């Protein structure tokens, strides 16, 4: 990366010149929360210093035969020592770097064979590795691609290998990954991952289609829009399924995750014009090249060199997906809605539907503009300035109705830039990291989440934060599935973590972090009652009074605060539950939970019964146990692990995680 083209280097030059020109005070006056986004962006745009020093130099996307051959030679070296996983990664890079025809024609004669020799060689070599890895269907597909581009001499060898692939496929010998413990130990690491289809909601909310019917929207001035349980929600129950309005893959993982569906792929199909992204299938490439990637392809190398972090790339995609023509008509109406509509109704259309697939729901997500400092606002205005320049330079945003580029007017520029300032603000507090579970095959207890992209999910973004969240998100490629991980009684608010959990950090540390990024004082139960990190909490389980939620004396079985005797379960003053019966029930499921944990983490195999034990134990602990409860947090983490494994999941062996790419 050329550091002279980075966002930080451009802004340093910009501020240095403003200082020399005595304009810093003027800057502070014009960039502050009292100003509208249009006023702030207009001021930045008309600065000569901004036009001179913040305008990025466009770095065109490239393909290189020499770079492709370099990666191919590294692949050959790895293949000679039978390091198939490394060879595969280098051959993938060779394919991504090779010059490529615009569209692969069915007739091989349509292409200059010499011009695409590097691409044919990459596909041929990769097919050989795939054959050795017993990935016969993938091998056959690569052979077809190589045959479309290769010479007769290579074609004969390829046809022979394809015939063998067909035989092995018909005999059921194509090696498939089943994520069982035994399969993992013998399966090639390159393909030790899962891309399952996401589950669907069984009962859809009639006004918020990406949410379950067990959830409803609520609003208070202090908590804003939020979601509450319309009925009891059990641990593991799905509360939201959403593909997101827009998603993007992080640059550092862009060669192993499809830029369209975000699923992992180790046999990628390249973009014909750049080496920055991959597609997992012909269908995704067709989708991407007729839509979002075609729009961003000309500026991706520049965006990568700028290194503006995560939100600007997502904002660029949002603008491209929505289109200038649509935004020009919608933005004035949406700004009017923001002023006149009740905050609870923001994002809903005239039919009373909160459509997460419509831009309206994204626009109306909270920005926290009034809480941002001048320094924060200035940074977002500069980011918006640069992205507006990129949109213009791409030649694919300011388009007429018949798809031809036009020179935007100042009004077009201000509309675009001010909308981007708006998104720089609301993405900061609403964009979600998209993650996959990384599991160490050798030691199942060793696992962690890894971010590979970000997205905007306008319905689940309405969930407020808690340092003791009762919901968690799980990803299937780009699809977010939110499940309850606690028992949530009717009327209680659904919460997720914005990154802070009481088990990991002190209250003071969490409050500072949340205030710095999200600009609110957390008032969850963990913060309000100053819960200690889990390492400082007594492991001794204590049953609670369902009235005051304080611990019941284990000897007398009485809540001294409420004077309720939980040992008495008959008569007029009977307790809400019987202490001994619930104690025995929890002990029973606690014992079964230990067996289930051994099956899950030690043996690597678990049954539906094990899953049920975890879910029942969580429900019991939520209903009857004094919080915080270490056993509940342990069971919740186990439940999250099980659901993470059902989503996008990568497996690796020993202490080395499979790298995303080789540079």
Image (spheres, rainbow, N blue to C red):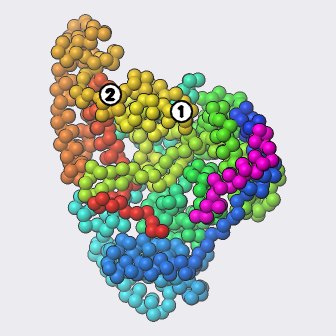
Residue name at image x 56 percent, y 51 percent: 310
Q: Is residue 110 magenta?
A: no
Residue appearing at x 30%, y 59% in the figure: 655
Picture quarter containing residue 248?
bottom right
* Neighbour tally class for label 2: few under 14, some 14-19, many 20 plus, Cα within 10 Å: many
Query: In this image, 182 relative to 380: left or right?
Result: left
Instruction: Tell me, for residue 628, which label it has, or none.
Output: 2
Say which residue appears at 50% left-offset and 70% top-offset: 269
Q: Is residue 10 magenta?
A: yes
Q: Nearer the viewer, mark 1 or mark 2?
A: 1
Vertical comparison of 353 with 651: above or below:
above
Q: Position of residue 503 (x, y in %)?
A: 36, 35
Q: Which residue is mark 1?
A: 515
Residue at position x 40%, y 35% from top?
505
| Camera sees residue 103 | no
Q: Are marks 1 and 2 in contact (CB under 8 Å)?
A: no
Q: Is residue 314 above or below residue 144?
A: above
Q: Secondary structure at mark 2?
A: loop
In the depicted structure, whether residue 151 falls above or below residue 564: below
Residue 522, position as x, y percentages in the image = 49, 28
Give the spatial CA distance, label 1 vs label 2.
23 Å
Question: In the picture provided, is 219 more to the left or to the right than 83?
Answer: right
The magenta-colored residue range is 1-27
Q: Which mark is residue 571?
A: none
For the residue labelled by badge 1, is the local secondary structure a helix, a strand or a loop?
helix
């Amino acid at each position: 990366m050329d550091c002279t083209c980075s966002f930080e280097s451009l802004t340093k030059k910009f501020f240095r010149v403003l200082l020399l020109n005595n304009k810093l005070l003027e800057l502070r006056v014009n960039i502050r929360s009292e100003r509208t986004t249009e006023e702030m962006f207009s001021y930045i745009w008309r600065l000569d210093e901004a036009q001179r020093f913040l305008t990025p130099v466009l770095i065109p996307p490239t393909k290189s035969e020499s770079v492709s051959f370099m990666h191919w030679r590294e692949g050959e070296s790895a293949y000679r020592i039978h390091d198939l996983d490394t060879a595969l990664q280098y051959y993938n890079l060779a394919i991504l770097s090779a010059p490529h025809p615009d569209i692969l024609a069915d007739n091989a004669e349509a292409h200059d064979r010499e011009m695409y020799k590097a691409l044919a060689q990459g596909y041929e070599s990769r097919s050989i590795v795939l054959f050795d890895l017993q990935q016969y269907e993938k091998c056959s597909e690569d052979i077809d691609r190589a045959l479309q581009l290769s010479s007769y001499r290579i074609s004969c060898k390829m046809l022979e290998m394809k015939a063998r692939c067909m035989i092995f496929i018909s005999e059921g010998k194509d090696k498939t990954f089943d994520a069982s413990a035994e399969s993992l130990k013998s399966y090639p690491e390159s393909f030790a991952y899962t891309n399952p289809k996401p589950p669907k909601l069984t009962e859809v909310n009639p006004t918020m289609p990406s949410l379950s019917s067990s959830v409803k929207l609520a609003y208070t001035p202090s908590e804003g829009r939020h979601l509450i349980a319309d009925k009891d929600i059990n641990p593991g129950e799905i509360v939201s399924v959403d593909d997101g309005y827009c998603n993007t893959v992080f640059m550092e993982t862009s060669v192993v995750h499809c830029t369209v569906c975000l699923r992992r792929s180790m046999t990628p199909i390249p973009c014909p014009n750049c080496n920055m992204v991959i597609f997992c299938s012909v269908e995704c490439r067709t989708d991407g090249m007729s839509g979002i990637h075609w729009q961003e392809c000309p500026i991706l190398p520049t965006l990568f060199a700028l290194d503006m972090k995560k939100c600007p790339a997502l904002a660029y995609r949002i603008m491209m997906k929505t289109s200038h023509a649509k935004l020009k008509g919608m933005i004035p109406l949406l700004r009017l809605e923001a002023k006149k509509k009740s905050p609870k109704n923001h994002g809903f259309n005239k039919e009373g539907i909160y459509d997460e697939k419509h831009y309206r729901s994204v626009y109306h997500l909270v920005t926290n503009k009034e809480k941002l400092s001048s320094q924060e606002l200035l940074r977002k205005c500069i980011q918006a300035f640069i992205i507006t320049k990129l949109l213009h330079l791409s030649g694919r945003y300011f388009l007429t109705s018949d798809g031809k580029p036009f020179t935007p007017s100042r009004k077009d520029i201000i509309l675009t830039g001010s909308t981007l300032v708006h998104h720089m603000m609301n993405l900061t507090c609403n964009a979600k990291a998209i993650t996959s579970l990384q599991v160490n095959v050798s030691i199942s207890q060793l696992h962690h989440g890894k971010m590979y992209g970000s997205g905007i999910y306008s319905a689940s973004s309405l969930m407020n934060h808690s340092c003791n969240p009762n919901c968690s998100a799980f990803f299937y490629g780009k699809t977010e599935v939110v499940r309850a991980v606690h028992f949530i009684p009717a009327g209680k608010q659904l919460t997720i973590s914005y990154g802070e959990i009481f088990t990991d950090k002190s209250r003071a540390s969490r409050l500072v972090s949340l205030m710095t990024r999200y600009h609110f004082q957390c008032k969850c139960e963990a913060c309000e009652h100053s819960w200690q990190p889990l390492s400082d909490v007594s492991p001794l389980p204590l049953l609670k009074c369902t009235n005051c939620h304080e611990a019941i004396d284990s000897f007398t079985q009485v809540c001294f605060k409420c004077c309720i005797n939980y040992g008495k379960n008959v008569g007029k003053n009977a307790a809400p539950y019987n202490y001994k019966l619930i104690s025995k029930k929890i002990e029973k499921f606690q014992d079964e939970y230990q067996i289930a944990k051994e099956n899950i983490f030690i043996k690597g195999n678990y049954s539906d019964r094990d899953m049920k034990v975890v879910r029942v134990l969580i429900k019991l602990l939520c209903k009857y146990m004094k919080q915080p409860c270490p056993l509940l947090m342990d069971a919740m983490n186990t439940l999250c692990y099980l659901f993470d494994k059902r989503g996008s999941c990568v497996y690796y062996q020993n202490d080395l995680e499979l790298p995303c790419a080789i540079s």
